[in-house]
Image: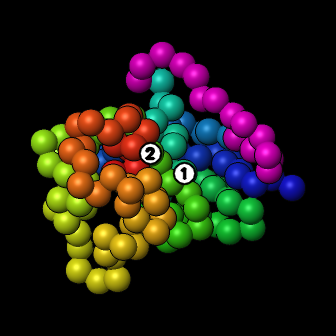
Amino acid sequence: MSLLTLEGVTAFYGSSQALFDVNLEIGAGEVVALMGRNGMGKTTTVKTICRLLPAKGVIRFGNQDLLPLPSYRAARLGIGLVPEGRRCFGNLSVEKNLTAAARPGNWTIETVTDMFPRLGERRSQIAASLSGGEQQML
């Protein structure tokens, strides 16, 4: 059984079609690389799977149809994108970065540090001194 299936997927940036009839099947345990020149649709494909772009066709994660879901619901299923860039305030501590990004609700610094214990260990450390992977966590 496929873990992730795309059938005839088209995606759009506004009214401009960015993906044309993409088909992809990934089984559990498989590792897949999307390769191509700049502007060929790699990031657009991943953003579409994450439900960050409007799309048509079929996108299934296991038995779950992703197309009708908003991006936050897809994220709850484990579908996510870690951007290549690191968007943190390099001159602030880890804790101050987390405070700056805080939103009302159940999200707290403790929630984040439970998910990413290394950030908890480095709460007072300046973000610019973190490794690249730690900055992505942040």
Residue at 70% x, 41% y: name it. 24
In the rendered view, tell whether residue 110 sits above or below residue 132: below
3D distance between C-alphas at marks 2 and 1: 13 Å
Residue 69 visible in the current orientation: no
The image's colour scheme reads rainbow
Name the residue located 23 percent from the left edge and 73 percent from the top edge: 103
Task: Indicate left or right for 94 with 131 as reference.
Answer: left
Q: Is residue 53 above or below residue 65?
A: above
Residue position for label 1: 49
Q: Nearer the viewer, residue 68 or 28?
A: 28
Is the magenta region chiefly helix, strand or loop?
Answer: loop
Is the C-beta separation of discs 2 and 1 under 8 Å?
no
114 to the left or right of 135: right
Residue 29 horizontal side relative to residue 10, left or right: right
Mark 2 is surrounded, within 10 Å at the Cα level, by few (under 14), some (14 to 19) or many (20 or more) other residues, namely: few
Residue pictured at 53% horizontal, 70% vertical:
76
Q: Nearer the viewer, residue 66 or 113?
A: 113
Q: Which quadrant is home to the N terminus?
A: bottom right
- Find residue 59 and name its label: none
The amino acid beneath tag 1 is: Ile
Q: Which residues lie in the magenta part?
A: 24-39
Which residue sits at x=54%, y=36%? 20
Q: Which mark is residue 82?
A: 2
- Residue at the top extreme of this rendering: 37
Q: Position of residue 116 (x, y in %)?
A: 46, 59
* Residue 83 drawn at (x, y percent): 39, 41
Mark 2 is on which residue type? Answer: Val
Q: Which mark sits nearer the N-terminus, 2 or 1?
A: 1
In the image, residue 31 lies in the stretch drawn in magenta: yes
